[in-house]
Image (cartoon, helix red, strand yellow):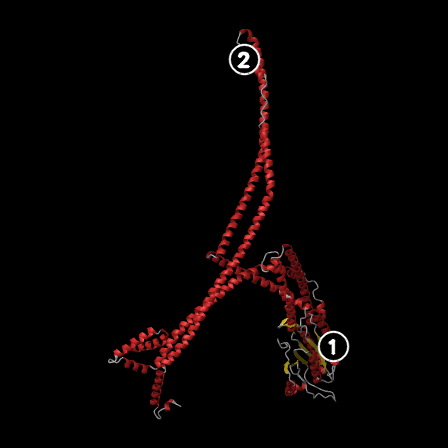
Amino acid sequence: MNITNFIPGQPILSWILALISGMLVLYFIRPSAHQLLDNLTTLIIQNLRLLSRSLSLSAKRMSERNKEVLLEHGKQQAERELERQFIRLGKLVEKDLSHYPTVQRNIEHNISAMEEKLTQTSVVPAPLPEWTEAVESITKLKDSTKNDAVVGKLLQAIYEAFHTQQKEVMSTYKKDISQRHNLLKSAMQHWRHLLDKLSNVESHWQHLNDQAKKIDLQIERFDNMIKGTDKAERLLKSSNSTQFFISLVVMAIAGFGAFVNYNLIALPMSELMPATSQVAGYNVADIGAAVIIMLELTVGLFFMEAIGITRLFPVIHFMEDKKRMIWACVCMIFLLALCFVEAGLAYMREAMVADKALLTSFLVAGNESAQAAPAETSNIPMIGQMTLGFVLPLILMFVAIPFESFIHTGRHALGSLVIQLFVLSSTLLRSASLFLKQFTASLKNIYDIFCFAPLWLEHLVDHRPASSNASLKITANDQSERIAAPTIKIAKDDSNGTQHKNKEA
Amino acid sequence: MKHLFIVFKLSLMVLFLGACTEQKPSTGLYMLLDTSGTYTKELKKAQQIIHYYLGTLGPGDSFAVARIDSGSFSEKDIVAKVTFDHRPSRANEQKRQFANTISQFIDSAKSSAYTDINGGLLLASEYLNETQANKKVIMVFSDMQEELPKGYKRDFSLNLTNYEVIALNVTKLRSDNKDPKMYMQRMNKWQQRVEQSGGRWRMVNDLEREGSLSL
């Protein structure tokens, strides 16, 4: 039914009637409509808040778990570093201590040699001849003219003999001194030797001291990790992120290497595997090439594990040393076999490419042209491809190291990312709940605009001068009800709010 | 017990992979060469086209070349046919042999008095059905003017569902020059015949245009 036909022939009046009716309907259902909006909003807001809180709690729990994982990884790393330091220290001590008996013998030998030399230098020269006593008695003779001539001659003879003797003694003494000097000189090399040995010992001790200091630092770090201090966590976080990105870059490079390797063997694999079969839309030959590369990576991973560079598989890591070495040898044999297979495939690839080129030239220009094709071709590409085929698997073997780092650090990096996402989602949900709250209030206001006339009239009636006290009483009663019954706050608030707005209007 | 379970799982995986293995979509190409009248002179062009497809087709694909003569519905008219081996090196060898056979045929081809195109099409459809190729293409290297000897009936219905029939190098006859309507009627007749049999019709006259010979 058309609105303009409410009152036949009076479209304007019909419109006015329709508007008034609409307003009245809106006015009468206003409390219910407001209640409905409030209920719906409360429902959605509560759910949003619940979800937000749940995400926030999950983020917190994940953060704690992440911290545990980080510290655990850090502990493992620190343990490995400590182990390495202790091994280094042990080797150093073993190496030095094994030399100490020799050094000691050497020092003792040098000392005894020096003692011997010193003993030799301390030999007392021969005593003076006994005639010195005779000279002494002659000097005691009394001075008399009778004896002058005899004494003079005697003294002269003694004097001469004395001089001769003195010369001899002096020369003997000089000779002895010279010999002693020579002995002392020869002792000098023993001193130097001794000094050298002692310096070596000192440097060894210094080295040991440095190692001990390093171990002290490691122990301190380890201690911090066990205590779970913030400093340790910060250090680990920064170290973890750096390692994660480095391993990511290295793995990307290795991925390109694997791609090159794949292209090298994909074509010749079609000779070994049926080129007409497919699995999930991919040629079986291509899948075979990819599987070979994955096998190489796996064997490389096992080899690195067996020689103790990585620690991804506890079963291999905790094997006895002998068994582990056997395992490493087996892995290396398999890897080398795969290397040879790849080199062979690279050779086959070159042959296939040449054959294809020959066929193309035959098809394009006929049999004569194919036969007249240049017979001399360089072997360099073939050798290059074969070398690549042999070397690439061995290089790809080292991807185990960044892979291990990626696995360990990726766990934390992924955890951090998820935490950030959870926090962001939680914030967004909280914002959405706030927005919804304000939006509902705005919707109610818009609703009131559509029934403004009855509301205005209600306002006028409520604010008649004669009944102002009564209305105040009603408001006071409302207030007391609101205090007494907080559970119906929204409905009461709304009615009061509306009244208040009406009053303001 | 645990090991047995692992072996069982691996066997299941292998079986699953085996079950997933499917044949690569293959192409079956059958080329009919018109040897009637003066069209024999055009066979050198046909040889180039055959060489082009020998270079394009791969392991698992099938290729056959047959001549159109007075009565083409005969295996004797098949000049060469091959399904390429799954090993590329063996496939290359097959291609060489195929090319040699075609070369010998073209050098020694003699003109036939009549042109039995329908017989050739029937033979081609039978051959391609046997190959079970996913994509079936029949190429007719002819002026598409059918002339049958007395007593030959070719009013059978063809089943060319999922076939593509390509008319190659359709030269204009002297009579076509006098009345082009005859040429157009002839082409329309062939198109209708192929499409009513469930196939797709295509005509390629400019052989040097890029992509014109793509399957």
Residue marked by disc 2: A139
When the figure is inspected, residue A481 is found, relative to residue A238, above or below; the finding is: below
At horizontal 34% and vertical 76% (from top left) the residue drawn is: A492
Residue at the farthest front position: A484
Q: What's the amino acid at mark 1?
A: Phe
Percent x, y for residue A10? 34, 91
Name the image quarter holding residue A279. Answer: bottom right
User: Which chain contains the residue that carries disc 1?
Assistant: B
Name the image quarter holding residue B32. Answer: bottom right
Q: For residue B105, which numbered disc appears in the image? A: 1
**Looking at the picture, do discs 1 and 2 lie on one chain?**
no
Identify the secondary structure beneath mark 2. Answer: helix
Q: What crowding class fits label 2: few (fewer than 14 Cα within 10 Å), some (14-19), or many (20 or more)?
A: few
Q: Is residue A286 visible?
A: no
Q: Is residue A9 left or right of residue B64?
A: left
Q: What crowding class fits label 1: few (fewer than 14 Cα within 10 Å), some (14-19), or many (20 or more)?
A: some
When the figure is inspected, residue A488 is found, relative to residue A20, above or below; the finding is: above
At horizontal 39% and vertical 74% (from top left) the residue drawn is: A437
Identify the secondary structure beneath mark 1. Answer: helix
Q: What's the amino acid at mark 2?
A: Thr
The alpha-carbon separation of the residues under discs 1 and 2 comes to 153 Å
Label 1 with label 2: CB-CB less than 8 Å: no
Percent x, y for residue A286? 64, 68
Q: Is residue A267 left or right of residue A443?
A: right
User: Which chain contains the residue that carries disc 2?
Assistant: A
Q: Is residue A177 left or right of residue A30?
A: right
